[in-house]
Image (cartoon, rainbow, N blue to C red):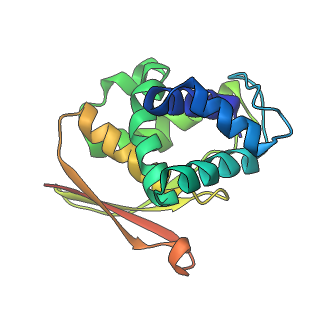
Amino acid sequence: MKGVVFVKFNEFIEHLWGDEFWDELLFEAKLPSEGVYTTVGLYDDQELFTLIGLVVAKKNISAKDAQIAFGKWVFKELYAAAPPQAHDFKDAFEFLHGVQSVIHIEVKKFNPDAILPEFTFLDESPTTLTFHYQSPRKLCFFCEGMVYGLAEHTHQDVLVSHKECEHNGDSRCVLEVEKI
């Protein structure tokens, strides 16, 4: 996983609970990287899952809620680094289409080895967008949080539901975003 995710997770944790809590997580996690992350580095995905697991245990929240909160928080951080074309999208649905057709293409230009989620759009109406979220990392709840961060950015109220979810035994993750 790209180091930017780890750097932002560090910032997220320190924002919510302080740098002492971050240090506590790193001490207990005993990570191969020792928690020394750079935005351009590549790190084992398991390190993020280990850190999330420790947050879940220490703060008595679910992994789902932790990932949603991080996704929502990090949206604005990643948006600031998004390619200029992404800043033209003013609607949540338009932006979600742009993730696949613009943002991830630009990311791949700079990081050809990046493993990015893919969206296959299944159905769309003026108020509902349904897409298949595909990622070997199975971070559909993080994606849900990113959608909530996006909706906040575009000043739109949305409800995200998982019509199918690998975490519930389904063969794939299908998210539905409804404008409310």
Quadrant that contains the N terminus: top right
Q: Is residue 146 above or below residue 122?
A: above
Percent position (x, y) of residue 110? Answer: 68, 24
Q: From where the camera sits, is residue 48 visible?
A: yes
Q: From where the camera sits, is residue 106 visible?
A: no
Percent position (x, y) of residue 155? Answer: 18, 35
The residue that appears at 23% across and 33% down in the rendered structure is 154
Q: Is residue 174 above or below residue 78?
A: below
In screen coordinates, is 11 left or right of 87?
A: right
Q: Is residue 15 above or below residue 127?
A: above
The residue that appears at 77% across and 27% down in the rendered structure is 41
The residue that appears at 56% across and 29% down in the rendered structure is 8
Residue 174: quadrant of the picture? bottom left
Task: Spot the residue most to the left.
Answer: 180
The residue that appears at 73% across and 47% down in the rendered structure is 45
In screen coordinates, is 169 left or right of 97?
A: right
Percent position (x, y) of residue 106? Answer: 58, 28
Quadrant that contains the C terminus: bottom left
Q: Nearer the viewer, residue 125 or 20?
A: 20
Percent position (x, y) of residue 5? Answer: 61, 34
Task: Spot the residue most to the bottom.
Answer: 169
Q: Is residue 39 above or below residue 75?
A: above
